[in-house]
Image (cartoon, rainbow, N blue to C red):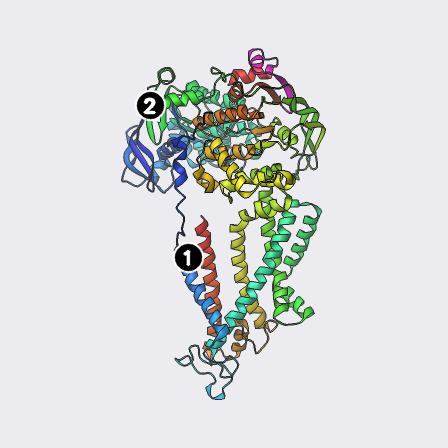
Amino acid sequence: MVTIEDLSVNFGSTEAVRHVNLEIQGGEILGVVGESGSGKSVTALTLMGLVSEEATVTSGRILFDDAVLQEAGKPRDKALYRRYQGERMSMVFQEPMTSLNPTQRVGRQVEEMLRLHSMPAYSEEGAPGRGTAAEPSSPAEPKGRAAGGRQQRQAMKQLVLETFAAVGLREPERVYGCYPHQLSGGMRQRVMIAMAIILHPRLIVADEPTTALDVTVQNQIMDLLREINEKRHNAILFITHDLNLARRICHRIAVMKDGRVVETGTPEEIFEHPREEYTRNLIEAVPSRMKRRTKRGGGGQICPEPVVTVRDLQVYYREGGNSLFSRGKKNHVVRDAGFEIRKGEILGLVGESGCGKTSLSKAILGMNRDITGEIRHYSTRPQMIFQDPYSSLNPSKTVGWLLEEPLRARGKLEPERAMSAADMRCAAMEMLGTVGLSEAYYDRRPSQLSGGQRQRISIGQALITRPGLVIADEPVSALDVTIQAQIMELMRRLQEEMGLAYLFISHDINVIYQMSDRIMVMKEGKILEIGETEEVFAHPREEYTRQLLRES
Amino acid sequence: MPRDKCPAGEENRADVKRKGGIKWNKYLIAGLCMTGLIVLLAIVGIFWTPYSTTSMSASERFAAPSLRHFFGTDNFGRDIFSRVMKGIGTTILISTLVVAMSGTAGILVGALTGYFGGVVDEVVMRVTDAINGFPSILLALVVISVMGTGQRNLVISLGIVFMPSFIRIVRSEFIRLRDADYISRARLMGVGRIRILFVHILPNIFSTFWVSVMIGFNNAILAESGMSYLGIGVQPPQASLGKMLSDAQGYLTTAPWYALAPGLTIVWIVLGFSLLSEGVQRLSK
C-alpha cells in the first residue's frame, strides 16, 4: 500500500535517513524499532509530510498506492498532502499532554477532523473499512449530508461519541465536554487515537504512542491498537524504541540504526535468528527476566546492619494550586511506610507514576519535610541520582568543577576533611576513570555530552564523597536500551566495589529484577510487598504484583 | 579491576561543539561598530574636544554644519559636535550607573525573594507592583523634587524606577531554577545557601539577565534624555543629549541641525546597543 523507496533525508549536512526501503501492506502492523537518533521518527514524519522545512529529501520517493507523495528534488506538494493527511493516513504522537490543545474541549478537537474533511468525502473513503467497525454504522450521517447546520453538527457529534466508545472511553458524553487537563494520560492518548481513526484512514502512524504512559495503561493502549487493526483493517506503522512492545503487536519489524534499516523480518525471525550484530545487541540489552543478575562477587557482602530505617512514615504533599476544592489541602502521598535498607544491598522500588515513589525518596533525603514518623540514617549525606540526565547537571559548569563541588562542600562542613585544589583535581580525574570516561572530559561542559555520558557524570558526582546510601530515581528510564544496559552495569559494579546501598527506583519491573537484591512494590502510597527478589517474582503475594508481572 | 570504558558510540557527539572562538554574526559586528564609535567619541570627549563646549561666540551663532563645525553651532555659537561628544559621555555614564545600581539591587533582592519565597517575597512583590503602578518619569520627578536636582540624584531616582523590572526578572529565573534537579543535588551535597544562590544558580541566569541589562541600558539612555529635556536632569552648562534636544526645540525651523545632532546620536546609541545585545544573544545559542 505504502512504499518507501531508497529514501534519504538530510538536515543541512547531517544525514538523518539513508536509503531506507520500507513497504507497508494494507492491514498490517509494521514496527520500526531503533534507538534515539536512528531516523525512525524522521522517516515517519517524512511519510506524513510533517517533517520540518529544514529537511530535504535527497534521494528516493514515497508512494501511497500508486500516487507519488514525495520525490527527491521536488518540493513537497502541500495540496496533495492535505488530501491524504487525516483522511487516508493519520498520526498518533508520543506526548498526549502536548498534542491536544489545552484551551479546547476534546470533543470539539476531534470534531474538527470532520469539519476540515467534509463528511461526504469521509463516507466514500471510509466505506470499505467500516463493515466490521465497533460502532453501529451511523444513521445520522445521510441526514448530515443533506441538511446543513444544526443537523450536521448533531451528526458529527454523534460520530465523535461513537468513536470515543470505540476507543474504549467510558462515558463518551462526559469526555466530549472535558478539557485535556481533566483527562488522564491514558484517556488523552485514547482521544488522540479516536482523532486518528475517526476518518477511517488506511494508515495510522503511531510514533511511540505508549512511551509516556504507565505499564498497565500502556498495555491497554497496545490492545486497543491491535483491536482497531483487527476490526478496521487499517495498516499501522508502529514506531518504538522498545523491542518487546514491537514483538507483541507487530506483524513485521524493521530495525533501524544510524538512518538505515539494518534488518526486516517477522518478530520470530528477528528475535530467534537475528542476522545482524546490532539487532543481537539490542535484544541482549533489553532488560528481561530471562537473565538474572550475576551473583555478587566477594567484594560486596550484604551486612545485616541498616544504613537507613524508616518507621511509620507518612508523607504529605501540600497542593499549592488555587483550585476551588484543593486549596491548602494536604495530600497524603505515602502511608505507613516502614522498611530498612541494609548496608551493601540494592533495594528495588517499583510502582506506577503517582504511587509515591519519588515522594518517599525525597522524604528519606530530607527534601520534603512535611512528614510524620521516623527516618533514621546511619550514613552521612546520602546522595541522589535523577532520571533526567539533561537537568541534573548544572549547565554553566565544567565536568571537573561538578565533580569537585561535593568535595568542596564537604570541606566547608567538615574542615578536618578539606582537600587542597590539587587533591580534588586528582580525585575528580580518578572518578572520571571510575565511571568510564577519559580525563579529557574534565574541561567539558554538560552540553557537550550525550545522555549516557551525563548520567555517568551524575553517578560520579554522587559517589565522589563515598556516601553509604544512594537513591537512584529512575536513573536509566530516559536512556536508550543499549546505554541503559551500560549504565546499569556501571552502577552495579560501583556498588560492589564501594559497598554502597542503593534504593533503586523504577517503573520497569524488569530493570528492577536485574538490579535488586530485595524488592519493594508500591501502589497508591502504600508499600504492598517487600521481599527477596526471587521470592517476590516466584511467589507474589499481592494481586497487584502479579498484575505487574503479567503485564511486563 | 575491570574498567568498562565508555564505548565509542557514546562518544561521537562530544567533540562537535568543542572548537571555541567567537562565531561572528552580523548583529554582533554591526552592534560592535556602532557602540565602538560611540564609546570612542565619549572617551576622546573626556580629554579633548575640537572646541571648548562652553565658549560662546556671537559671530558664529547658528552656523550650519560645515568642515569647521561638523554639526554646526547653537544659539550661543557653541560647537555642537563638541557638545555631543561631551553629552555622550554624560549620558552613557548616567545610564551605566543607573543600570549598575538597579541591576545589583535586582540580583540581590530578586535572588533572595525568588529562592526563599515566603512573606518577604510577597511584600517585596507588592512594593515593586506599587512602583510599577506609577508612570516612571513621574516617579523620578517626585524623587528629584524631594532630593533636588543634580547628577547623583538623577542616577538614584532613575535607579529606583528601573529596579522593579530587574527584581522581577531575576526573581522569576530563581524561582524557575530553585527546584531544578541540579540544585536539589547541590543541597544534598551540603552546599551552603549563599553559595547555591550565587555560584550555582546565578551563572545560569546570565543570558536572561544580560538581555534585560541591555534593554534597561537603552531605556536609561532614553529616560535620562527625557529627564534632561524636562529640565530636571543634567543642569547647564553641562552637556547632555537630552538637554541639548530641549534647548534646540525653539530653533527647529531655523537651525534644524541643532536638534538633529543629539537626536540622531540617541537613535544611534540605542540602535547600537540593541544590535549588540541581539548579537550577544545569538552568540550564546
Residue B219, placed above or below residue A474: below
Please name the residue that numbered disc 1 is placed on: B27
Residue B2 location, x and y as percent?
45, 25
Residue B246 location, x and y as percent?
54, 75
A526 in magenta: yes
Q: Is residue A121 visible?
A: no
Residue A108 location, x and y as percent?
51, 35
Q: Secondary structure at mark 2?
A: strand
Please name the residue that numbered disc 2 is placed on: A263
Q: Secondary structure at mark 1?
A: helix
Instruction: Answer left or right for A246 relative to A318.
Output: left
Residue positioned 39% across, 22% down in the render: A281
A408 in magenta: no
Q: Which mark is residue A135?
A: none
Residue flagged by tag 1: what amino acid is it?
Tyr
Residue A426, placed above or below residue A32: below
Residue, far top: A539
CA neighbours of label 1 inside 10 A, class few (<14), some (14 to 19), many (20+): many
CA neighbours of label 2 inside 10 A, class few (<14), some (14 to 19), many (20+): some
- Which chain does tag 2 point to? A
- Which chain does tag 1 point to? B
Residue A417 sits in which quadrant? top right
Residue, far bottom: B59
Find the distance from the CA under tag 1 to the CA under tag 2. 48 Å
Q: Is residue B30 visible?
A: yes
Q: Tell which of B41 and B6 is nearer to you.
A: B6
Q: Which residues are magenta?
A: A523-543
